[in-house]
Image (cartoon, grey):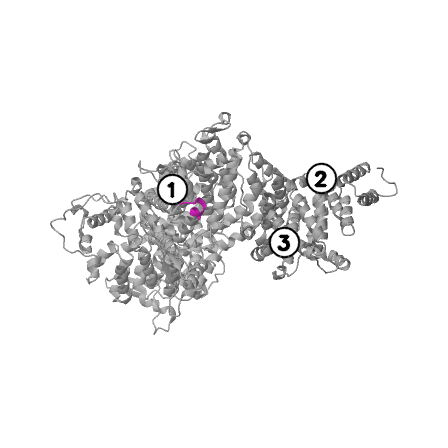
Amino acid sequence: MEVSARGSPWDDVVEIIKAAQGKGCDPLSWAIQIHSLLNSAGESLPSLELADVLVSYICWENNVPIMWKFLEKAFMLKIVPPMFVLALLSVRVIPCRNFQPAAYRLYLELLRRHAFELKSLINGPNYPKVMKTIDHVFRHSQIFGLTQSGPGIIVVEFIFSIVWQLLDASMDDEGLLKLTPEKKSRWAILYQEMELDMHDSYSDKKTEHQEKLQNLNTLTAIDIIGQFLQDKKSSRILYLVRQNMPIHWRSFIQQLQLMGANSLAVRKSRTVSSGVILKFASDTDVVWSDERKMRSQQKFQAFLAFDYLSSSASLCHGASHSALWIPLDLVLEDAMDGYQVSTTSAIEIISGLIKTLRAINGTSWHDTFLGLWLAALRVVQRERDPIEGPMPRIDTRLCMLLCIIPLVITEFIEEDEMTPIHESDIGPTDHLTDKRVPGKCRGELVSSLQILGDYQSLLVPPQSIVAAANQAAAKAMLSVSGITIGSAYFESLSMQEMPIDFSGNMRHLIVEACIARNLLDTSAYLWPGYVSGQINRLPQCLPTQALGWSSFMKGAALTPPMVNALVSSPASSLAELEKIFEIATQGSEDEKISGATILCGASLLKGWNIQEHTVHFIIRLLSPSVPAESTEGNNHLINYAPILNVLLVGIAPVDCVQTFSLHGLVPQLACSLMPICEVFGSCVPNVSWTLSSGEEISAHAVFSNAFILLLRLWKFNRPPLEHGIGDVPTVGSQLTPEYLLLVRNSHLMSAGNIHKDRNRRRLSTIATLSSPNSIFVDSFPKLKAWYRQHLACIASTLSGLVHGTPFHQIVEGILNMMFIKINKGSQASVPSGSSSSSGPGNEDNSTRPKLPAWDILEAIPFVVDAALTACAHGRFSPRELATGLKDLADFLPASLATIVSYFSAEVTRGVWKPAFMNGTDWPSPAANLLNVEQQIKKILAATGVDVPSLDPGGSSPSTLPLPLAAFVSLTITYKIDKASERFLNLAGPALESLAAGCPWPCMPIVASLWTQKAKRWSDFLVFSASRTVFLHNSDAVVQLLKSCFTATLGMNSSPFSCNGGVGALLGHGFKSHLCGGISPVAPGILYLRVYRSLRDVVFLTEEIVSILMHSVREIVSGGLPKERLDKLKTAKDGIRYGQVSLAASMTRVKLAAALGASLVWLSGGFMLVQLLIKETLPSWFIAVHRSDQEEESAGMVAMLGGYALAYFAVLCGAFAWGVDSSSSASKRRPNVLGIHMEFLASALDDVDVLKRLSNGLRQLNEEKLALALLSAGGLGTMGAAAELIIDNEM
């Protein structure tokens, strides 16, 4: 038929329709005629215009059966787009369904037949145009308000709209729509015009036939809804709505649930049930019913099902076990660093880490406890014979194994066995308590300790505790043998007197520690192999009852011999400690001192079974309560001076301070020390106390002991160039007096929370008993003034000393005291600022200032500045300067802190001329310098780091900055004895920090000088010098990081890394037990002792990520050169790449990622992790990182590299923020991850990019992973995900 020339072809189409309708023509021939007409007219088919013409013609003047048949033939011949026709019919027929039930019936049949033909839709011509037109018909922008659009997104909206319109219509037909919050259809905006037309054209009267048809239509609509919910493609498209349109989905689901629970039609339906509808409404994830492709299944099951604990021999070495627990080993070893105390309890840190590792690795409690015991045993064995020096020794390591770890396990078992009773179950007279329920955690502890006996090499006790181990074994053997003896006899019994060798080991001590905390009972003594026999008889001559805890508990007096006995042996029970504490608080003055002395003895360092109580009692003694009759504020502390001094001296050793740190009591200890400093620092020096022994202590002595101990609790001596991270506060700024008090106050604030863990309850109790109120620095004005002066001294040079003022006279008086002999002999004067001293003085005590300690400390920066200036101008010799400084420190030991503060600031200014260490003016290091250099090279041999020469200038003498030379000369004057130990514990780290901040080779020179002074500290000093190699060269730090990875992965020929794993990373600590002298130190130990001194840690994240990805490439190559790499092939025991199994490669990749995450977390905490996620990872993803090796690895490098980055990022985030909401750090998780998700959304916003990534996964037969990638992309990729579902019929 020829198209008319009078207008568009649509006029001719309408004429043909009318003619065919009038003649009753066959609908198929009719459709063919229209098809021919439009082809000759050049119209593209299927035609959107024809669809609009047909629907407009039918609705409603020509609503006759033949027209609906013609419409279906038009679908068949593809002259109209079916989905567009269905959209047009939806907005015309659904609102008129009550007036046109037959039309609604025909519409539903068309919907049933054609609405699921989605693949032909997205692959058909004019797909974008068709969807855009459908979007206009349904007014999606008004209904859903999405910010993005596109053909795929409109497909999702179209399916969702059809289903929801049917749901609304069906609920309205049954009267259920009024039960919804809206009480009307949300599609009314589309229906309003149609409803008005129908009300004008039809009456409201219903025939019986119409009513039956309407009921049948409702049932049919519900069947079609069920078909949409159960069809594989449409149901998954609907789940995309759930992911990306949550508000609309929630309303839809509420209606669906309402219909499923109340619809009569649903109950009558034979194809869909209320259970199916409600199940769909409650499902949270898509259940993929397809079988995975065979190749993909084999590839991924090879490592997903791999047993990482399959080899028990790898528990100490190798990658398998280390992949799980290497973060734990690093954290435990890091806690042994004496240069840093922690404000957070090791119990809390380790508990959080264990929860994280269990959640990520899915380990059982048995494997968790076994890994925990083995890691703690390695900590002890690593330094079983530690080098000497001002650093934690074996006692701190034993505290970790025998006290901290049992307390950690106690927390887990309590959490497992205790369930809080709901408040509604509590009566008016009941207390809120916990209810004990059976748990399997305790049983898994037992099994782990039984297996622990197989690791004999780790159970050998250090020499210092062999007797304790034997005694623990003897206790078990006597119990098994049925021999009951009193504890007094047991205390006095020598193991040499017994007729059998008990062969006690570390497991015996561990079991006793667990029994003491009710984790085990004495049935453990019956475990197979726990004891090596029985005792049939005891020695004939039983010893008489000796002095000890048993006789003390029976009422023996605290005589000096008894005190010595109790000091040298730890208490065995809380009752014994409580009795000592009672004496220390309520006894006579001498008894109080004895009680304090006993608490600071073996019970503190070796009383592992009761150590948490010992530190608690010491803290309480340091914070005596104000008597009720006292009205003088903190002056009540004056009456406690003798006992306070005993406590301060008793807890001064490094191991003692670390013990308080491990128990989380540093904030509370600082809070107890501050009022002591405030009160005794305000006393004049003639205030003193004479003890019964004849010893006299002064207010200056008490103040100095407290003040020096307080300063050791934060990094007060750091130079002004602190290491910072991005735009966040510097790391060092956290350890300040204010911060310590804030942490302590936070313990107090949480005292009322009964649902916190055991450790937090304990910290809250200690804080409350010490002082029930919050405490701030403003409560200590003298301390606050000193601290401000200290900060000002660091920030700028000294100023403000005015001649003739009282303050100037104090400075002059101190200078006279320091240099009285010089002044007397030479009549010289020491200039202080603008003035000079008043001349010679007397040698008696009359020259000593009679001033409170705070006034002296205020003047010391000016005093030291004047003395150093005089020395620089030749008015004093270096020896005289050192002698004067030592006299000042002897007069007021606390002045050492301010001297450190001044020198630390001045050494960074660069204004002082160098001091020539020539042996004449200043001491010379020449005798030891070359030896120190050789030893440093030995220590760093395993890292591949080059050590700069210590004598680059030939025979010229070594030089040091003048402030450093003066300070090292001062420290050399101290004797290495117990009396000086507490002062050297402050001066030693300060000296190292001071020297490390100066140019190379200042620290080796200092080490050489000190080695001449303290030969038994030689190893410690040389190791300290070796650390500074990394502080002056970032390339050396990078090389050290590389060494950590290669050693852990076993990738080089170093003796440390032959097997890889934890043993290779951390080795044997500072020196080998196999040969004498200095030997190479494992790279992990070096890094743990270096990273805190790095001033810039920001660069570490990029370097660690780069090294991690390089390690992945090395793992894939198996250490083979590129030309020998084979293609990916399958073997009987699994998939292999070259000669390395995929399972083994995955384990090593996981190990590398765990190491990298641990190093990032330790180096900078959550701030560095935040930087990693916000900056480093995004930049890494954007950049291109590809090597020739990756091109030849059949995608293995890319796959393993992706896994490594994913595991690395997840671990970093979990370490920083935990895996639950119990920690305060977890509150930061949403913000940081939100920023990262925004980056991913913006970086991957290009749908074409995601399609290419998805296509790559599909080529690997990973259609499900491809869909998961698109589904996780948010609204921007929802359309691409829908098209993938449809195209692949997923």
Residue 79 percent across, percent down from the top left = 75, 40
Residue 883 percent across, percent down from the top left = 36, 52
The amino acid beneath tag 2 is Met
| Closest to the observer, 493 or 1289 | 1289
What mark, if any, has residue 155 been given in the picture? none
| Closest to the observer, 247 or 1103 | 247
Q: Are marks 2 and 3 in contact (CB under 8 Å)?
A: no
Question: 856 left or right of 247?
Answer: left
What span is colored magenta in the figure?
356-363
- What is the C-alpha distance between the residues marked 2 and 3? 28 Å
Residue beneath disc 1: 1023
In the depicted structure, whether residue 1202 falls above or below residue 839: above
Residue beneath disc 2: 76
| Closest to the observer, 242 or 895 | 242
Q: Please say whether residue 357 is one of the residues in the magenta stretch.
A: yes
Circle 2: element type: helix
Residue that sits furthest to the left in the current view: 540
